Amino acid sequence: MRLLIIGTLGGQIGAASQIAMQKGAKVQQADTVERALDQLRAGQGADLIMIDVHSDIARLVASLESERIALPVIACGIGNDSQAAVRAIKAGAKEYVPLPPDAELIAAVLQAVSEEPSTIVYADQGMTDVIKMADQVAPSEASVLITGASGTGKEMMARHLHAKSRRKDKVFVAVNCAAIPENLLESELFGHEKGAFTGAVSRRVGKFEEADGGTLLLDEVSEMDPRLQAKLLRALQEREIDRVGGGKPVKVDVRIIATSNRNLQEEVAKGTFREDLYFRLNVVNLAMPSLARREKDIPLLARHFVKKYSEANHIEERPLSEAALARLKSHNWPGNVRELENAIHRAVILATGSEIGPETITVSGVQGAPAAADADADAATLVGRTVADVERDLIIDTLHHCLGNRTHAANILGISIRTLRNKLRQYSQEGFAVPQPGEASAAPAP
């Protein structure tokens, strides 16, 4: 976790920094918004910004948006000043934290934005074999291609490789190639010079330079446009990049890890992925097994998520009943570990008794009913409906199942996050209720 603090935080910057560092964060500081932006443009990346409530929060947020720097902003101010908090939220801050800093509150904020799980939970032999190979190749400089269906834990495996590598004390930078529009991905990867295009108000360092000395994860690399694949291949071969609008190559030292939920050999055969780039990335291949092939891991992971989300929601931890475990084992988990995690998160919230029973387990958008009966009922309800209506209900039900998490829902549905957002925007305009992030409602789509 990399934390950037802007301003003095009402004189509490030292205390806030100390708490954050004790929780494992790496802390940077900037006196002003402009200096903070300069640091970010120069490749001194961050995962979270904490800014003094008296700073120009609106300007910071507007600059981050215009320069396509996606970072959560937390405002901090002395005491519980409700007016200051309202102004900060209206200006674009995600949250307001009162000062002097409370250790538990700072830890909660850091945990809320951190997506860096450090431990892979497993017992099944198939996953054991993959971990063994990963540990063997991690210390090398070889590029690694991690393949597998959505939700199998490809990014977590990439972080595991980095943690076991000789670069573990350097930065780990991840780029989701599927989530960034094609016309912006080149600038995101390679950076740009001032004036290179409309909106390029200053030089900005790309992810390759930001990851210099460390590891760069190209998540879902198969979604990359073929034209950009050629530039990526050159960067890997020559170990140098060209900023958009730049005239001089920049040397970089990065270890590349790529992931894909597609069969890249098939993509090469179809002509949508360059064969030479495939061979450059696929020096070592780690194939993540589906959860359906990890039967021993289902109860282990389920109990792990029960503990995690009981603590996160301040709920007394309840054991999973035998009937609930049986229901979990009987499902084929098309969304893999991510789907299981979402199902357990929902079950933890909905459970009311001394145990987590099968009635709280929602799988594939259906709650607490046998799979065969579900299939018959679903088939009957499809007759006479349009494809568009069925698609809408499927998308909204899946989003409910994922507690409003757009990325998780897109992965389960097998569509890009961009396609999902366009669909949801359309549904909202048509008057349908679209679940928001964090919603735990089990209500069906309208």
Image (spheres, helix red, strand yellow):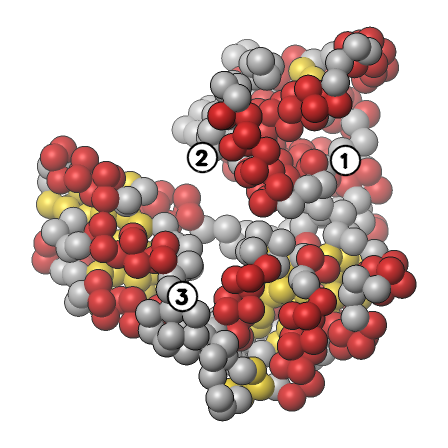
Residue 161 visible to an observer of this rendering: no
Label drawn at residue 86? none
Give the distance between the C-alpha atoms of the residues marked 2 and 1, in whole angstroms: 26 Å
Residue visible at 83% across and 72% down in the picture: 275
Secondary structure of the residue carrying tag 2 is helix
Image coords of residue 152 (percent x, y) = 71, 47
Q: Is residue 394 or residue 289 the one in the foreground?
A: 394
> Residue at label 2?
312
Image coords of residue 187 (percent x, y) = 50, 69
Image coords of residue 287 (percent x, y) = 80, 57
> How many residues crowd mark 1 within 10 Å: few (<14), some (14–19), many (20+)?
many
Residue 71, quarter of picture? bottom left
Residue visible at 29% across and 72% down in the picture: 38
**Residue at the outermost bottom position:** 248
Viewer-nearest of discs 2 and 1:
1
Q: Is residue 349 left or right of residue 25?
A: right
Residue 423, quarter of picture? top right
Q: Is residue 162 left or right of residue 429?
A: right
Residue visible at 41% across and 44% down in the picture: 112
> How many residues crowd mark 3 within 10 Å: few (<14), some (14–19), many (20+)?
few
Q: Are marks 2 and 1 in contact (CB under 8 Å)?
A: no
As displayed, is residue 291 above or below residue 153? above
**Which of marks 3 and 2 precedes in the sequence?**
3
Give the distance between the C-alpha atoms of the residues marked 2 and 3, in whole angstroms: 43 Å
> Residue at label 1?
334
Viewer-nearest of discs 2 and 3:
3
Image coords of residue 99 (percent x, y) = 16, 46
- For badge 1, the amino acid type reads Pro
Q: The C terminus lies in which quarter of the figure?
A: top right
> Residue at label 3?
198
